[in-house]
Image (tube, grey):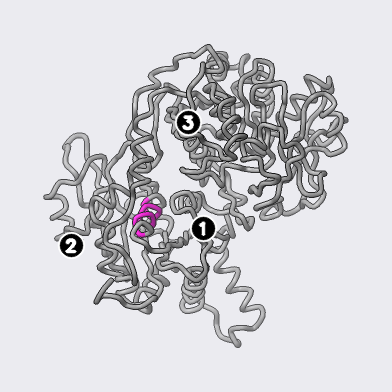
Amino acid sequence: MGEGGRGKEMKYVLVTGGVVSGLGKGVTASSIGVVLKACGLRVTSIKIDPYLNTDAGTMSPFEHGEVFVLDDGGEVDLDLGNYERFLDIKLTCDNNITTGKIYQSVINKERKGDYLGKTVQVVPHITDAIQEWIERVAMVPVDGKEGPADVCVIELGGTIGDIESRPFIEALSQFSYRVGPQNFCLVHVSLVPVLSVVGEQKTKPTQHSVQRLRALGLTPNILACRSTKPLGENVKEKLSQFCHVQVENIISLYDVSNIWRIPLLLKDQNVHVAVLRILRPWGASWEPKLEKWIKMANNCDSLDDPVRIAMVGKYTGLSDSYLSVLKALLHASIALRRKLVVEWVPASDLEEQTAKETPNLYEKAWNLLMGSDGVLVPGGFGDRGVQGKILAAKYARENNVPFLGICLGMQIAVIEFARSVLNLKDANSTEFDPETKNPCIIFMPEGSKTHMGGTMRLGSRRTVFHSLDSKSAKLYGNVKFVDERHRHRYEVNPDMAVEFEHAGLEFVGRDESGKRMEILELPSHPYYVGVQFHPEFKSRPERPSAPFLGLIAASCGQLDALLQASSQRHHLIPKRVQSNVISNGNIYQNGAPNKTVKNIMGGVVFSNGNGVHV
């Protein structure tokens, strides 16, 4: 950067949050990374979660949203999924720091005698461990290139003032002083609410949040203010006066039509200029190249023809429980020029017990299912709603409705097929019925029945295609194998595989040993696919996941054209695939499906009388 160049020191951007949680720090941090990457810089990311859990693996999706799985098997916070999707990088489990990991590492050192008999304390031992972890992980390349990144974006979870984050605040305060102001930029995300009675944007919550932050030893360089509408100039001046932040460094994060407009929003308000003036990284361009983001955002807003996917799951009350699945559906829908409408179907509402107790919920769930163009049964644990998922798989199989089952969803398809086609009425998973006489889903031999955390089959594993003529192999580009991420304890019983295949259910993908079933297909069905892995974790805006692309294509009548294009060109998405008739002719209108709800954090969001849908 000319005379301001400071050499290739690691630069750090810390993103903190104030007032309330859920403001979108993760998306803001990811978007800042996108803008800096568009300036020619290499970017890595770290997420700090102050909870005592070692990782997110044992946490309920209702508590903390989905558990995102990395290539190395790390079970981490869903924000790392945002980082990977936005920045197109591959992170490791060390990119997610938790209080549990830090304390565990310090206690392990103490037990080995590394502290030479000293009294081990929060300061300096815990705070030093946090700083050392950040510096070590920041140097690990995550973009497939050699050497460390130029900038490390760090997100501190929670809100300023939380008691559990105090050691991290102290460590980061020390860290900012140690690396120097030319290597450290603090972005504070806060809320500027509008009281409906007054109709005025109120700055006091942000003022108090910044005061608390400064009292803890950190001074913000940039304020990113969440609001429903752009901040007024008088509001910016007031915040500048009382928060001691330059007016041009106060960014208005107002609601936009889709998530891909957030990097554009930051660029339009010159966030990159503010960050570059502070950090002065070597070799950065002052003009970010965001053409592909402009194209994606515009494409997303221009879609009109809907494709309706029934999401039959256990955690439908919280969309973050299936965040990566929603993103993968969105990537595939946009690639095929369709507006995604997700119909949330609580699996238990499809069951006969619900018909007896609350018949209105039963009727609503079945109307949503039958009014959808495709059915998706995502992963999950526990037996609640399992019978409803089996009924959904049965409906899709018998009525030629496109179906995709992921992890447990694949196992559900196997159980349903065993009961309905093989006539094994008590067929089940040993997870739900340990005494079943026909265990078509069994506990994996290497699993642990005493420890829950980190004991599943986790991370990137290879799937070898046994049939290159299958739909899945064609969707993946006619390759011989694929590497996808896994997270499961149970698997298809290999002793029953031959019986299933004789009845018409083919296992077209298996692991390298050939004994572990990875992908199933029903060749006689337009699109009936189950995968043991989680393809959603590797889906990217410009590279949609193959199984999701197949589901959306089949749901809107484009699958044959897509498969033909794949066979001819060895890649997935033709420049323009002409639409045929929608595969499921009956479209049920539920509420107001085309009513747009603006929301900065959720992509294109539609309200259809059944909650808010990405």
Q: Give the position of the N terminus as an image quadrant.
A: bottom left
User: Where residue 565 is drawn, which disc sits there?
Assistant: none
Residue at the top extreme? 586
Q: Is residue 468 magenta?
A: no
Question: How far, Cα to Cα, is label 1 from label 3?
Answer: 40 Å
Residue 246 numbered tag: 2
Mark 2 vs mark 3: in front: 3
Disc 1 is placed on an element classified as: loop
Quarter of the image holding residue 375? top right
Looking at the rendering, the stretch of residues picked out in magenta corresponds to 28-36
Q: Which mark is residue 336?
A: 3
Residue 226 on image: x %, y %: 29, 47
User: Which three-letter amino acid code belongs to the residue tagged 2?
Assistant: Gln
The amino acid on which the numbered mark 1 sits, given as a three-letter code, is Tyr
Give the quarter of the figure containing the C terminus.
Answer: top left
Residue 259 lies, in percent from the top left, at: 37, 42
